[in-house]
Every structure is written in structure tokens, then in C-alpha cells.
Image (spheres, coloured by chain):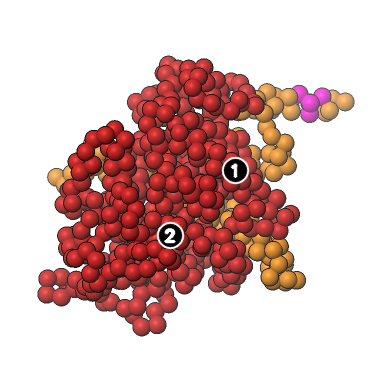
Amino acid sequence: MATTLTGVSLSTTVVAKADSARIQPLRSSCLNHPWKLNHVKVGRMSVRTMVAPDSLSEKVSQSIEEAKETCADDPVSGECAAAWDEVEEVSAAANDARRKKKEADSDPLEVYCKDNPETDECRTYDD
Amino acid sequence: MAICTVYTSHSLNSTCSIPTPTKTYLGFNQKQVIFFTTSKRSNRRGSSYSTEISCAAEKTVVIGLAADSGCGKSTFMRRLTSVFGGAAEPPKGGNPDSNTLISDTTTVICLDDYHSLDRTGRKVNKVTALDPKANDFDLMYEQVKALKEGIAVQKPIYNHVSGLLDPPELIKPPKILVIEGLHPMYDARVRELLDFSIYLDISNEVKFAWKIQRDMAERGHSLESIKASIEARKPDFDAYIDPQKQYADAVIEVLPTTLIPDDNEGKVLRVRLIMKEGVKYFNPVYLFDEGSTISWIPCGRKLTCSYPGIKFNYGPDAYYDNEVSVLEMDGQFDRLDELIYVESHLSNISTKFYGEVTQQMLKHADFPGSNNGTGLFQTIVGLKIRDLYEQLIASRTGAPLEASKVK
């Protein structure tokens, strides 16, 4: 009994904390797709928190395996095309996430100056 | 995302017909305000509720950009927004996986947001994202039309990470709206709304080379998987994406070089800028003499180029049933003086000062394609769009058209 109670109180705290920190209605789809939580959770201002590219990488290799399997039966089916289309989509997303992560890891001023080299704060002086 | 502010904008400006929000996100007000005022750079946290929507004050100019996934649309967008000044950024405080980019003048929306089937839905229905059946053209048309008329919309967000449709985000009518994606010219109604359209036509050889560059480092990918993906998508690509290029006002074709015999590395590129004749406010770029057929090798006594050199071609041509001018560049630049030398021989490039093309290219030297025709022609098309925009606005306000033209 005591253990159960501890468990209950613990989960209540978590829920309360989550409630205050993020958007309230979590769509049911989020619950079915846990990877979505990674980015919904951290809705803090302009800090862009990315899904770890690792999980997307996994998704890439997983979808490639699936596409190979799907196409083994019928290489010209709509199913096969859809499977490889998913590979393209997640590969593009993984590449995008890598690029964003690289930007997030680097100096924000450098990222800004790359696009706005003419502004005062981006000037460099030789002497 | 900015659903709370919809109430604000709605009450402030009753002439806007904004869809009634279906959900209220309480406890998020502060963030909403920040998101909503991103167009004003100086606004910071805690600022007042100064929501302003410029309804129908000035009609939005709409540009369409079509290309396959992974074919350089985002690089093009960065060059284009740079020509207009200021960098484009994702909406602040919104969904971190939003596909939208916003700068002072320009909003770029990704048409993947109009997917009617999410990743699972496409799998179940056995269709690719290229298939019109996976896209909601009615909604696309309604929303682009609304934005063009100065009305804000709640646009869905397709999340490329999760493969799901996320809650919508508020898009306010910008001065320039770019719709980029697989199908900007597919639906006749949407096509009708475009003031200018561009198609990036990447040949299969180059597409393969680019995707190797993008994906080879990724676990699970191999030359075979990259090839298989391109080939499996090709029937739908040929059926639904490729035909759109006949409607484009400008096509940028990217091909393997012909300067190196049997080259299939895809490193040196031959790029062709195909420009439709007779498009209002768009005067095609030319080399030396408008309407003549010119072949030009800038390398020689005045300019030393390294192997395989640079070659330009220019001339009138036919593309589908249209009369066009084609400017072609094969090879790549080694140094800046090559570019300024080339720029000085091109006419009608709509620059505001001598060397603007070179300056833009230098500014983004780290972008892909900055040393070849893709970067050069993307930059030139950006300048042409700026010119078109200025002429369109001038024509609406009744000011003389010639004022905005320098060259």
C-alpha cells in the first residue's frame, strides 16, 4: 500500500510540473508517438531544441529496412514507392536536424553574422 | 500556435475574416505576444498588446518555387531573402518544427504543410507525398488567396520529424509571400495567384550526386538505397512534379558539365537559366546582345581560369510552347575577379549598383553552389524578383515604372 501511494504522489508532481511548463492540450497522437514529446516539451522562447538527430538517424535506417522489405515483393507497387518516399522524407529531416544542431551548437553571433555580415556587431577589424 | 492572439487581432480588426479558433491554450499568453510581434525587431518580452495587421493595405506579391525534395530550395530561399535585406528566420516562440521562414519583407511557407495525409496515412493509402491525393489543394488555394488579399490565416504545420500534422500557426500577410514545395504550380487556381514562378530542374545525375553528399554519412544509407529511393519516386515525380515546369516564368536547369568528357562526378555543373519572354515586369537577362546567339569563353588573356574553365551560352529558344531566352553557364569560378568580370558583361540583371551580384555571392560564399551557375542564377533570379516586386508596387501606387530600374 505504501509503495502504491508513493507512486501516485510522484506521478502527480510530474503532471503538475508538466502542466505549468507547456501547452496544455496534448493531442492524443503525441501520446502514441513518444518521439514527438521531445520537441513539444520544451517550448521555451526562441531556443530551438531539436529532436536528437540520433533518433532520426534510427528512423532513417529503420525506414530503409522497411522499404527494402516492402519492395522485395513488388518493386513497382504504390506501397514500394510510398516506402522509399518516406526514406527521402526522413533523410531530408535528419539532414535538416543535423544542420540545425550544428547551428545551435555554434556561437549564435556567428550564425547571425553569417546572414548579416554588414551589420555593426558583425564587423571584423584587422588591426 | 498563436491562437490566443487570434482573439486580439480579430477584435482589433474586424475586416479580417480569421477562422474561429477551436482550441485555447491558456497560460501561454506572454509567449504568444512575443511571437506575434516578431515583425517588429525591437519588441521584447513584456511589451504591450500592440498587434497590428495590415489588412488589404497593400496586396501581397506571391512567388511560387517548385522543386523536388533535397534540390536546393532552402538555399535559394536564403539567397532570395538576402537580396531583400535581412535574414529569414523561423517564427519565434512557435512550433520549433515549423517550416515557415519570416523576414522583414518576406514570408516563405512550405507547401508540405498542406499534406492531407500524414506519413502513416500515405503508407496506408500507398501513395507518396508527390501524389496530389496526399495534398489538400482546396485549402492551399483558399489560404494563399486569403494571404494575397491581406487576410491572415491559420496554416497547418506538417511536422517533418514526426510525420504528423501539428496544430496550425498564424500567418500574417507579408509584402512578399513565397510558396515553396512540390506543387506550387500544380493546381490551376493556385497557379493563377502567382505573380512569378520558378522551377528548379535538377537532372537525375546531379540529383544522385547531391543526395549522396547529403545521405551517405547517414547510417543505413548506401549508394543502392539512395538510387532506389530516387527511382521508386520517379514515376510520381514525372507524373506530378516535372510537368509544372511548363508553367514556370523561370526555370533553373542543373546538368552535369560538358567541359569534362564523360564526367559523372556531379561536381562541375552546367546550369541553364530559362526565362520566359513576355512576362510582365520581367525582362530576361542577356549576354552582350539581346536576342542574338552568343557563345562566350571568358577565360583567356584578360582572365585566367583553371581547368576545366568556364563557358557561357546565350540565345533565344523554345521551351514547351513558349518563347524563351536561355543563359547558360558551364564550369565554376575560382576567384572573385572572375565573377565581377562576368557580371559586368551581363545586362538586365536588375542590380541597384555595380557589382551587386558579386557582393551577394561573396556574402554567402559558404552556401552550396556559390562558385557555379546555381548560385549565380539563383542570385540573379532573386534580383529579378526584387525588381518585379518594386515595379508591381509602383504600378499599384501609380508611380512611374522606370524609377526602379538601374540597368
**Quarter holding the N terminus of chain B?**
top right
**Mark seen at residue B138:** 1
Mark carried by residue B298: none
Which numbered tag is attached to residue B200?
2
Q: Are marks 1 and 2 on the same chain?
A: yes
In this rendering, position of residue B338 left or right of residue B32 = left
* Prevailing SS of the magenta stretch: helix
Q: Are marks 1 and 2 in contact (CB under 8 Å)?
A: no
State left or right for residue B31 relative to residue B356.
Answer: right
Real-space CA distance between mark 1 and mark 2, rounded to the nearest whole angstrom: 24 Å
Q: Is residue B33 above or below residue A121?
A: above
**Residue appearing at x 44%, y 49% in the figure:** B64
Magenta region, residue range: A5-9
Q: Quadrant of residue B26?
A: top right
Q: Nearer the viewer, residue A27 or A58?
A: A27
Q: Position of residue A87 (x, y in %)?
A: 61, 60
Which quadrant of the view contains residue B278? Answer: bottom left
Q: Colour of chain B?
A: red
Q: Is residue B346 left or right of residue B388?
A: left
Residue B345 at least partly seen: yes
Outermost residue, bottom direction? B261
For image coordinates 58% across by 67% down, the residue present is B234
Indicate the position of residue B166 as horizontal and vertical percent values: 61, 39
> Which hue belongs to chain A?
orange
Disc 1 chain ID: B
**Label 2 Cα crowd, 10 Å radius (few <14 / some 14-19 / many 20+):** many
Is label 1 in a helix, a strand or a loop?
helix
